[in-house]
Image (cartoon, rainbow, N blue to C red):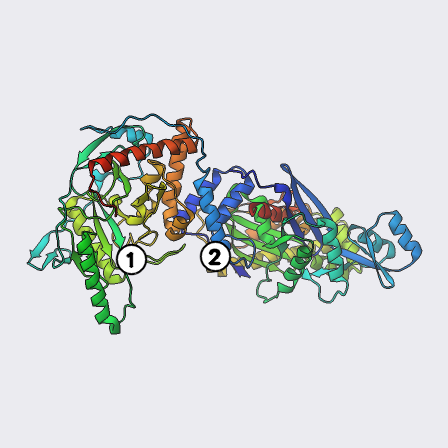
Amino acid sequence: MKNTTRNPGTAMGLDVGTSRIVMAQRSGEEYQYDSQLNAFVAIPYAKLTEGVLQKEEVPYTVRGSEIIVHGNESEKFAELLNTETRRTMTRGVLDAKEPEGLAVIRQLITALAGPAKEKQKLFFTVPAASLGAEENLTYHEATVRQILAELGYEAKSINEGLAVVYAEMESSNFSGVGISCGGGLCNVCLAYLSVPVLSFSIPKAGDYIDSSAAQVTGERSNRIRLAKEDSFHFNGFFTDKIHQVLGVYYDEVIHGLVAGMKQAFANSRTMPKLSRPIPLVLSGGTAVPEGFRDRFEKILGENEFPIQISEIRMAANPLTTSAKGALVAALSDL
Amino acid sequence: MTVQVTPSSPGEAHLVEWRARRIEDPVERLRYLRRSTSGDSSRGTAGAAKRRLHIFHKYLRGVAPSLLYVLVLLPAPTPSSTMDTERWEQAVQSPFGNPAREVYPAIWQVEKTGGYEVYSNGLRIEDQYATSNRPRALYPVFGRMPVEDPTFAWRSGVAGIVFHTTESHMLPFQAEQNQDLQRLGKNLLAVVRQNRSYHFVIDRFGRVFRVVQESDAANHAGESVWADATGTYVNLNDSFLGVAVEAETERGTDPQPSASPAQIHALRVLTEMLRSKYRIPASNCVTHAQVSVNPDNMRIGYHTDWAGNFPFAAVGLQDNYAMPPASLYAFGFEYDPAFVKSTGARVWKGLLLAEEQMREQAAARGMTVAKYRIALQQRFRQIHAALRNGNPEEKQS
């Protein structure tokens, strides 16, 4: 039954990804999204440049002798200036080596979420620790939480893979495997009746594909990423070298993901006794290319998998799935 | 790699899953699931489990009774020699076993002396504290749905067993405490004997003591309700035997059995003997917390001994915590967060079933749950008042 005192409009979901930051809100029965590239370029300061940016309403900040253009416009500028965009995050967490990282991610989150209304709840995604690694995610999580707290939010974190389950697996009572293949990581979560039973990440994802392909082809990673998002598809026949190389590294990522899942599920001592096969949902920008699902299913089928999967499907909107899941979690927490 | 707690036992998970499927709104469904399981997407939220439990309770309870109410005019209870059990079975699908098909243990008395009795299953009953009380009286058994059926039947004999804990002072169960353990046990038995509190007491060492004679009523479950396939019992002092374990109830969401292995063994052999002697169905062997009600505030669980940790399986019984309490579905009693907190997950199955049953009954009559609950409670008050008038010297347990 619905509690009429709850206002769904007051909850927010924020997917803080290595590549993109996506904000989700609900308006009536509709989910609304806004996103920014989690990237920036630094260009030398000139009054003329600043004037152009103001005129074109491009978000920027001046830092000393540089103008920092962040978010969605950064890619365009990088292309114009023939340079690489810089990232605030690497492998799913804040990049400690990037001096501008904290300032830029604060700008991006502020631009997307804005100041909170009174006691507004916000769930933000965090990655799971990498399989077999003792990664410390505390700094990343605490920093994002602090940014949100300064904006006035009652912020809680949610595992990115679990967010996929919450966004997509209502029909199976939130039981299943949610996978988010992003820029820095592939996050995996097995949930049973909404409870995260097992979650982990694989440190090879979109950025690994981009940088590996860039190395081999001599192209910039930005360009590889654009090629990957615009025209790459898994059909076994590649018209140019970039696509051929992308296919090789995609295969490597999928093989690594499947092997990691197999190892994690087989070694887990806390697996619930599942009475029926469960669904598996793929999401995230790296899973967007046409044919990804089929390729994943084929590679999964080549391996003896420890749990029975009822279906493998793509999320309805892979780029906003995690943000939606975070929002659903926030709404259910009201 | 993060590994979190798995939700529950398969049986409970199945029930939660079934219930969740009936919630259409995905957010509401997730809210229900997160609060009925140990799921929490956020990290490090200490106290979240308590909060979830509280909200889960509120969810289960559904719409609180409003101030508006509709009184359903119901006839006062009148004696009848026949009971329309068929109608009750049609009205509510029976969660009870078929008593005719029940297998009863075959236990006989081997020896009886002035001080003890021995039975064929190894049970030994100490008789030195045995005493008498008022003889067991005829008691009324109402229909399975008393709100629809004004009749009741008079019966005699033992219909079931209520398991209690003495909730008395517990010393550490250690050899060096032996003298004090014995002293406390004797003091307890003296008090129980004086108050005619139970028929049997099992002390810390697993010894079974007879207190009130089986032919007499003990003051162990005055304000109480239970139902079986044949009808609904109100005030179980005359119809059910009281068996108490010298123990304190463990509370919480995952309470451990309060009884020691010796006490559990004693419970098993005593229960076998009583079931054999009186042909007691397994579903009528229940705990005090399951049957106890408070008519003043119309809530169940006035007493919470054996609230969620009775070792039914070890005692040779089915898990009766999964049974829907008749106090809820037949008389519209409610429960508060404290009860849910003290019971643990095992009782939720029964509570969920009872809530669901009541919702279905209300829907079948075209009534809201709140209005239907008021009608059920009205019926209980009529019966309760009639019983009070008929048994003026009745003591509340």
Provide the residue designation for mark 2.
B5
Q: Is residue B355 left or right of residue B154?
A: right
Tell me where residue B36 appears, x and y as whole percent.
46, 48
Q: Name the outermost residue toward the bottom.
A: B176
Q: Amino acid at mark 2?
A: Val
Q: Nearer the viewer, residue B276 or B184?
A: B184
A85 to the left or right of A192 = right
Q: Are marks 2 and 1 on the same chain?
A: yes
Q: Residues within 10 Å of mark 2 (few under 14, many from 20)?
A: some
Residue B55 lies, in percent from the top left, at: 48, 47
Q: Could you give the CA–CA distance between mark 2 and mark 1, rounded to whole angstroms?
A: 32 Å
x, y percent for residue A139 = 65, 64
Amino acid type of the residue that numbered disc 1 sits on in the rendered structure: Glu
Quadrant of image for the N terminus of chain B: bottom right
In which quadrant of the rendered view does residue A62 lie? bottom right
Q: Which residue is mark 1?
A: B167
Q: Examine the rendered structure and indicate whether residue B156 appears above or below residue B321.
A: above
Helix, strand, or loop for circle 1?
A: loop
Tell me if I can see residue A281 in this picture. no
Q: Is residue B380 above or below residue A330?
A: above
Whole-percent x, y for residue B181 in the image: 23, 67
Secondary structure of the residue carrying tag 2 is loop
Q: Chain of mark 2?
A: B
Q: B13 and A11: which one is in front?
A: A11
> Would residue A73 be seen by someone viewing this image from the given angle?
yes
